[in-house]
Image (spheres, rainbow, N blue to C red):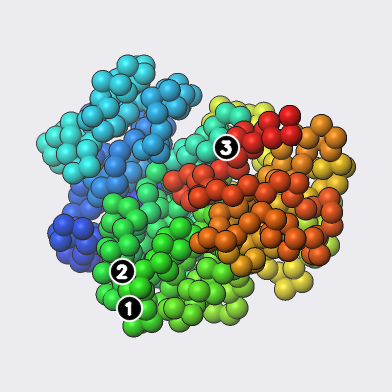
Amino acid sequence: MYDANHLIRQLRESSLGREEDVFARLPEGGTVTFGALFAGAERMAAALAAQGVQPGDRVAVQVQKTIQAIELYLGTVMAGGIFLPLNTAYTGPEVAYFVGDASPRVVVCDPARLEEISAIAGAAQVLTLDAAGQGSLRDLADGQGGFDPVARKADDLAAILYTSGTTGRSKGAMLSHDNLASNSLTLRDCWRFTKDDVLIHALPIFHTHGLFVATNVALFAGAKVVFLPGFDADAILNAMPAATALMGVPTFYTRLLADARLTKERAAKMRLFISGSAPLLVDTHEQWEARTGHRILERYGMTETNMSTSNPYDGERRAGTVGFPLPGVEARVMRDGAEVPAGEIGVLEVRGANVFQGYWQMPEKTAEELQPDGWFITGDMAKIDADGYVTIVGREKDLIITGGFNVYPKEVESLIDDQPGVLESAVIGVPHPDFGEAVVAVVVPEGKGTSAEAIKAALSGHLAKFKQPKEIILLEALPRNTMGKVQKKALREAYAGLFG
């Protein structure tokens, strides 16, 4: 029925013969079996085909997290289409850019935004799907029967995910069937997922973490998921005694640590806590281990590569690092065209079957970042120690050059975060009339009594003067995107005029 390279064939393989087994437990108490999931996906595929979706056509989707949205993802790929998920927070003008760039055949949105999205959808057919999984697309799908999946090759596109666009225009990362399948299989095996696992799924599904890591890995393993619409401390803590794994962002873990119900007893049946999408503080690692008896497994990936490195399942999970390159993935740290010695900082490059096919309609940008021999320039500053552990130091664009000297924000942030009374920090460079850029630290205090002067005094004996912040700003919270990443661009813009 499926071409051997088809992502859907591979996703379905682990549950063949287990169609009546439960795949998802829903918040309202219902369940969805593997058979129902894939039958729903076939109906979605048939509905899309009835709307004219041909192999290679894009299907843009901006909807709430529901099982029907997962069926739409699977159905799009089944129909030979290219799934294009969009952050639910994107405004009309932002959606207009993505639609204009990708020229989708179909756009699926929330019914409440039908008029707004229709006005910017161009020639695309606009269908709806709401937070209950209802809408015009569901109505069309419910009237369909089965569907014969369209044959696809390993390098045919399965998805386009737009990068967050922290610098310049958002870029559409093109991901093939093999990019997604090979990476999910590797993660399933490295993290020991099996049909006996129950994964707490609280991540959004418009992002690679929730869609191509959490969802795909669970399906490749034939595992169950506790399918939550978003982060909910009550729901996660209630699910924990009967679950085995949680995938989250650092914010999940810090918020759960703030809840007294998080105990070793509650986490006793859990085998794995995974964190990614943003750096996890060493303090969070240590607090989590003390409270639950579990050491969080931190990993590293990007929209363009899915996952590239992971701390080991067995062996030392080193706080502050993102572990080793995954099997089949190579990593190196480069500076001025040459690989740097162990422990030195440079730009991280990765190569493997996980690396994307390039940027949609941006051949020049693709050529800049994806080299002919397959190495992808991530733009992340990193170092690889003598034991092979990779540590991400920051984005290349976040590098601060002050008075001709390089300052890596992570080094300064780590020292600030270690200070008593500090919850977290973000170090940025802003324009300065004498130094070109000045180092500025934005700090979130933990409780009262923390002062900028005390932090400056604590840093003076540990950092060269050029690395020390010229200003320390105290805020109640750092700006973050939906995946928990600190938005340094927003901070740089907010404080661009600090030194006139």
Look at mark 2 in the image and give the residue it sits on: 237
Q: Quadrant of residue 465?
A: bottom right
Query: Does the rendering let one see residue 299?
Result: no
Q: Nearer the viewer, mark 3 or mark 1?
A: 3
Q: CA distance from mark 3 to mark 1?
A: 38 Å
Furthest residue to the front? 449
Q: CA distance from mark 3 to mark 2?
A: 33 Å
- Are the residues flagged by discs 1 and 2 in contact, CB closer than 8 Å? yes
Query: What amino acid type is highlighted by mark number 3?
Result: Ala
**Residue visible at 18% across and 54% down?**
36
Q: Position of residue 262 (x, y in %)?
A: 36, 74
**Residue visible at 32% across and 28% down?**
107
Q: Nearer the viewer, residue 304 or 185?
A: 304
Q: Position of residue 342 (x, y in %)?
A: 80, 65
Q: Quadrant of the C terminus?
A: top right
Earlier residue among tags 3 and 1: 1
Q: Position of residue 313 (x, y in %)?
A: 52, 75
Furthest residue to the right? 404
Query: What amino acid type is highlighted by mark number 1?
Result: Arg
Q: Quadrant of residue 99?
A: top left
SS at mark 1? loop
Side (left or right) of 48 relative to 207 = left
Look at mark 3 in the image and give the residue it sits on: 490
Local packing at callout 3 (Cα closer than 10 Å; few below 14, some 14-19, many 20+) is some
Query: What amino acid type is highlighted by mark number 2?
Result: Leu
